[in-house]
Image (cartoon, rainbow, N blue to C red):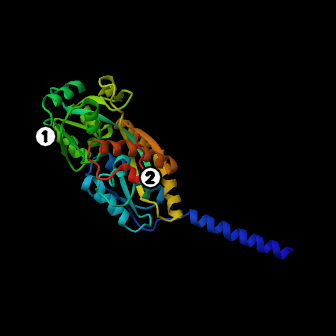
């Protein structure tokens, strides 16, 4: 009997040791986050704050590298094509990752092939140059109707958040505009500040500083509630002027291939949870007029299915989708 107890306790000790060891995975070399957009945009800013905070928890350097091109699809695919060992991550938005296959930008990976970690939610703000003659979204819509296809609207590229926003605006108002794509949200904002384009419908995180500096003028926010930006003022919801306009906003954070080892995933989960609660992230949210969140796992999967249904079926309706959203499991809203 005594020998049986010794054997049982030995087995339990070994199993507990294995479990603890698996939960204590440690990164042995630097990690790379590839942001598939130009520096300065919402994806880039969010990734850099997360990198700085997660370095503390992981005890390893995290390098952020910008690889813009293909509306973010080139860098995103590069992350997936790297070894699935947890050392290469993507820094992107939910609304971009879900469009790549529907728009024909990627054959793979699917939005379902990623672990999604989102730390920032930011709504879309409709802005124009500070000296623009447009003082409301109704002014802007009226000009677009007067000169169909001539009013220039900047975005980070086909399928990006700003492009989806412009198409949402177009659908609600019946206008036509001229789409001017750039290599990221920040370049699109700067182009509008410099007068290269007439308007930009980008994320609050990307336009807040330019609004405070009086280099841009906000016409409306694509949310049901007003947006208050400290040092600038309150921005009215677009529905106040265009009642049938739909709300639009995006989640920003990290995407990591699902095939990474479970022990690596648990370690990343813990580090992300700490980063999501950090003062640095809260400060970013406050400064950039957005919201700090912690969305991963099942909640993140549900969130991307929701935004994927909205933006992909919109692109299908306007004839820009190369493949039906239904092919990738997106239900029509």
Residue drawn at x 44%, y 52% is: 116
Q: Position of residue 129 (x, y in %)?
A: 18, 33
Q: Which residue is mark 2?
A: 116
Residue drawn at x 22%, y 50% is: 183
Above or below residue 129? Residue 297 is: below
Q: Give the position of the C terminus as an image quadrant.
A: top left
Foreground residue among 296 and 146: 146
**Mark identifier at residue 196:** 1
Foreground residue among 254 and 60: 254
> Which of the 4 image quadrants contains residue 195?
top left
Is any atom of residue 280 visible in this view? no
Q: Position of residue 97 (x, y in %)?
A: 36, 52
Q: How many marks?
A: 2
Q: Position of residue 6 (x, y in %)?
A: 79, 73
Foreground residue among 13 and 199: 199
Q: Residue furthest bottom?
A: 3
**For the residue labelled by badge 1, is the local secondary structure a helix, a strand or a loop?**
loop
């Amino acid at each position: 009997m005594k020998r049986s107890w010794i054997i049982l306790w030995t087995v339990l000790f070994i199993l507990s040791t294995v479990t603890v060891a698996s939960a204590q995975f440690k990164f042995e070399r630097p990690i790379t986050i590839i942001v598939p957009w130009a520096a300065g945009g919402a994806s880039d800013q969010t990734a850099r704050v997360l990198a700085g905070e997660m370095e503390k928890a992981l005890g390893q350097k995290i390098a952020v590298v910008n690889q813009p091109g293909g509306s973010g699809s080139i860098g995103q695919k590069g992350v997936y094509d790297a070894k699935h060992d947890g050392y290469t991550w993507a820094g992107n938005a939910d609304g971009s990752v879900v469009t790549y296959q529907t728009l024909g930008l990627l054959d793979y990976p699917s939005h379902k092939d990623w672990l999604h970690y989102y730390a920032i939610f930011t709504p879309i703000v409709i802005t124009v140059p500070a000296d623009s003659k447009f003082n409301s979204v109704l002014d802007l819509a009226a000009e677009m109707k007067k000169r169909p296809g001539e009013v220039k609207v900047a975005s980070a590229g086909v399928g990006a958040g700003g492009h989806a926003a412009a198409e949402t605006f177009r659908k609600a108002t019946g206008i036509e505009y001229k789409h001017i794509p750039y290599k990221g949200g920040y370049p699109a904002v700067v182009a509008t500040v410099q007068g290269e384009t007439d308007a930009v419908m980008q994320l609050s995180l990307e336009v807040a500083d330019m609004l405070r500096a009086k280099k841009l003028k906000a016409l409306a926010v694509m949310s049901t509630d007003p947006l208050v930006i400290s040092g600038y003022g309150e921005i009215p919801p677009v529905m106040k002027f265009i009642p049938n306009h739909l709300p639009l906003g995006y989640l920003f954070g990290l995407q990591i291939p699902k095939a990474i080892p479970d022990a690596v995933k648990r370690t990343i989960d813990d580090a992300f949870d700490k980063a999501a609660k950090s003062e640095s992230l809260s400060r970013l949210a406050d400064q950039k007029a957005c919201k700090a969140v912690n969305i991963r796992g099942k909640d993140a999967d549900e969130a991307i299915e929701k935004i994927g249904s909205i933006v992909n079926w919109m692109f299908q309706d306007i004839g820009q989708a190369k493949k039906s959203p239904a092919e990738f499991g997106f239900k029509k809203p």
